[in-house]
Image (cartoon, rainbow, N blue to C red):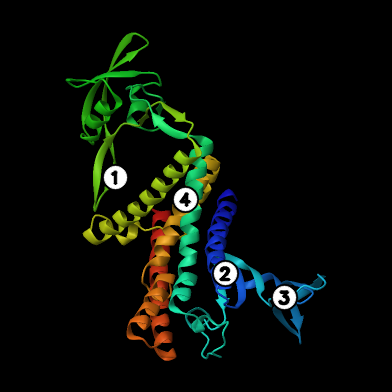
Amino acid sequence: MTTLLSFILLLGILVTIHELGHFFAARSVGVYVEKFSIGMPPRIFTITSIDHGFLFRLFFYKKKGGVLKWQPVYEKLIKRNNRIGTNTEYVIALLPLGGYVKMAGMLDESMDSSLKNEENEFMSKPLWAKIWILIAGVLMNTLLAFFIFSSIAFFQGIPEYSKEPVVSKVQDEMPAKKIGILPGDRIIKIDDSYISSWKDMTSIIHANPQKELNIKVDRFGKTEEFKVLTTFTLIPNKSKIDTIGIIGISPQFFYEKPTLIKSTLVGLDRTISSFNLIISSIGMLFSGSASVSDLGGPIMIAQLAGQTAEAGLVPFFTFMALLSVNLAFLNILPIPGLDGGHIFIHLIEGIIRRPLTINTRMVIQQIGMAFLLVLMFTVIFSDITRLFN
């Protein structure tokens, strides 16, 4: 249940923030928004902005003409005298797997087949306004990640590890735990090398994956010696993956209380680093260091959402920030069907100084959607394979 609820909360926040970017950007340049939806159909309830109030509707199955249909089962008019409505329909839908903003004259999104050439249509706006609307979702997700990273740095503090080679934590089911290393042990020697800092120690262990090492520790003034067979882990390094040795120990950490300015700088640095990590991962895919089967889809996201939620608010919101960066990066790619694809098409129109035909746009849109469906099927298949293995 924790996994499901945290997944719904996580995805709901990220999608809402993204779509709010498109919504506010469209409104800021005078584009009429017909519908703002969180989730995918069918609708659960809607609120429509009308003159003199709001119209609330609740949807469920109901018989009509002897046929059971999903339709409004309850309506209520919430009156607000002298209010001028926008006729925008705000929707909460059943499936928490996405959302969209339906704008007047937005051929790529709404799949409308005709334009009225009215001033409040998306296609009637200048190029800069179109790009502003399309890129606003990406900007909102980036700003969300920056805000979360900065807030965590400000309220939790900036973690700094002690340079002393003193063990603070020992991980379960790892070599150090199995041989009897305890929290508080000071590592003083590995094989023939004397250790004076945590960096000295890690450089030796990392360089020796799956090898036996002789470790000497100082335990409250008494010397203890151990033989340990290191295990390994994989870490990204530019466009490849490195294999490093580990034994499952952590250093002592303390938290520096930063100023507001320092927190924002840390938030900016972590946001940029998250984008760099995605770029490195893509480089590893092209270089063959990683494969498509390593990609994660909805199942992996749900699992990680549940695990981080159980670990606490800081891990959960950190994961949310990382996922928000991933969503921003994915959407800015020049793939038809994504925000970046739409921007690319409008830039082409700006270069050739004429709009593409509606049929051409529809074909490009369909190709892009087909590619995204194949990608989605691939990552879900990888998720399922990983789940059973």
Q: Nearer the viewer, mark 2 or mark 1?
A: 2
Q: CA distance from mark 2 to mark 3?
A: 16 Å
**Disc 1 to disc 4: CB gap under 8 Å:** no
Amino acid at pointer 4: Phe
SS at circle 3 = loop
Binning the other alpha carbons within 10 Å of mark 3 as few (below 14), some (14 to 19) or many (20 upward) gives some
Amino acid type shown at disc 1 = Leu
State the count of labels: 4
Q: Is residue 349 left or right of residue 46?
A: left
Which sits in the foreground, 250 or 381? 250
- Pinpoint residue 243: horizontal percent, then vertical percent: 24, 43
Q: Front-most of 319 and 176?
A: 319
Residue, disc 4: 146
Cα–Cα span, label 1 and label 4:
27 Å
Query: In this rendering, would 60 be left or right of 151?
Result: right
User: In the rendered view, would you say 357 is above or below 106?
Assistant: below
In the image, residue 226 sits, relative to residue 207, either above or below, namely above
Query: What residue is shown at x 60% (from left), y 78% (from top)?
Result: 32
Q: Is the residue marked by circle 2 packed among few (<14), some (14-19), or many (20+) residues within 10 Å?
A: many
Image location (x, y in percent) of residue 178:
35, 27
Residue 381 in view, yes or no: no
Q: CA distance from mark 3 to mark 4?
A: 34 Å
> Would you name the residue on which mark 1 appears?
234
**Is tag 3's residue or tag 4's residue first in the polypeptide sequence?**
3
212 relative position to 79: left or right: left
Instruction: Judge depth for marks 1 and 4 and give the one in front.
Output: 4
Q: Write the residue at 48% across / 55% down.
A: 143
| Residue indicated by mark 3 | 85
Mark 4 to mark 2: distance in Å?
21 Å
Q: Which residue is mark 2?
A: 23
